[in-house]
Amino acid sequence: MNIKGRLLEIPGLVISEKIEKMDPNKLNAYLQSLNAFVENISGLREQVEESIKSQEYGLLIRSLTDVRDMLLDIYAGPLALSCQEQIDILQKKEKNSQEIEDAVDILTGSILTLSIDLQMLAIDVKKDEAERREREEKEKAEVLEDDGDVKSILAVDDRAFFLDILKETLRDTAYKLTCVNSSKTALLFLKSNSPDLFILDIDMPDMDGFELAGKIREGGHKAPIIFLTSNDKRSYVIKAIESGGSDFIVKPFDKEQVIARIKKHIIKHTVKKD
């Protein structure tokens, strides 16, 4: 059931005529009003309860008036009317303190029920949104896997040992992996190629991975950069992000994690380009 249908099921709201006229922007604004109501109503209920205990009926009238106005803002007409009835009774002093307390208890109970219903709605909406995003990501991944478009990766490390491990890790995947052993060679390669993802070692002679990442970005390449590292120093992480890095692969390699991280960033980059 969509969000409008769920709103129609909440007993305290009278919105059947209004909600059908709401475009997405107006619906979003209304949902924000409901969230504001949930956030503020508990404080107002506490004011109502305290004013009843102290028999400060002037404060009770003001608190109920605030509650009434909030209920009107979210189209909770029947509850707003009940608030107004209690305000009228208080102003006319037609009931004793016990009768007032009993009546307001019933009213606040109904308001509490509405607040809980709205909170449950918000939870359901977030859950639905998370599930929708998960479905979309899965569908995008399936499209990318089935479209026959081979994604290319450039890996740069001055040690052949790690490049060989990376080749073995990606051997049975559909990715086209190019490995070079220096930043200089990588920059030459990029003059005529544009990979879908970069894997860069950080600690390399002549030009380290951070500097190479900067050169890659200066050259107009926007593909994700994943750094190879065995260093978890905070300064390394911050510098990697500032250099344009998207993620890390930690040495020694974990095959499943390597493939998962590569796939995640290639999907994001491909979807962004589309």
Image: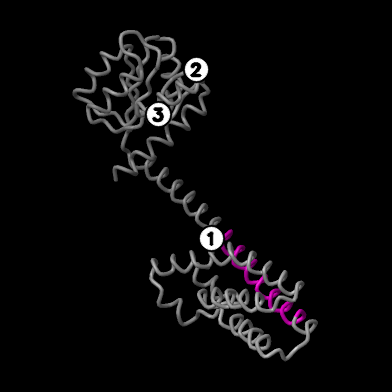
Residue 273 in percent (x, y) is at 29, 42
Residue 70 in percent (x, y) is at 55, 73
Residue at 29% in and 45% down? 274
Three-letter residue code for mark 2: Asn
Mark 3 or 1: in front is 3
Dominant secondary structure, magenta: helix
Residue at 51% in and 24% down? 255
16 to 51, vertically: above or below: below
- Circle 1 SS class: helix
23 to 225, vertically: above or below: below
Q: Mark 1 points at which residue?
A: 125
Task: Determine if the magenta segment contains residue 114.
Answer: yes
Which residues, given as a range, are shown in magenta?
101-124
Q: Name the residue under label 3.
A: 241
- Circle 2 SS class: loop
Q: Name the residue under label 2.
A: 231
